[in-house]
Image (cartoon, rainbow, N blue to C red):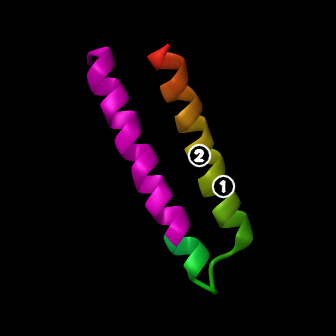
Amino acid sequence: MSLSSHLTELKKKHHTLSIEVEEAQRSPGIDDLHIAQLKKQKLKLKEEIERLSS
């Protein structure tokens, strides 16, 4: 897998997590811990994208 395709895949996953976080925050039955875990995954992806982009 090339670097650019890997970055593209990471960005897609990051975007998907963004949508999941937004939906979870709007849903009253979702546990705050679950939202925090989603945000943590999203942050790790962002850091990986930034690391590979520089």
Q: Is residue 25 magenta?
A: no
Q: Nearer the viewer, residue 37 or 54?
A: 54
Q: Which residue is mark 1?
A: 37
- Rendering quarter of residue 12: top left
Q: Which residues are magenta?
A: 1-22
SS at mark 1 in the image? helix
Residue 26 at x, y = what percent?
A: 56, 80
> Label 1 is placed on what type of residue?
Gln
Indicate whether 43 appears above or below 19.
above
Residue closest to the eye, 54 or 29: 54
| Residue at position x 45%, y 62% in the image | 19
Q: Is residue 3 magenta?
A: yes
Residue in the picture at 40% in, 45% down: 13
Instruction: Judge left or right: residue 26 versus residue 2.
Output: right
> Where 14 sits versus 4, above or below?
below
Q: Dividing the picture into quarters, in which one does residue 44 lie?
A: top right
Where is residue 52 drawn, in percent x and y?
Answer: 47, 17
Compared across the picture, whether 27 is left or right of 15 comes to: right
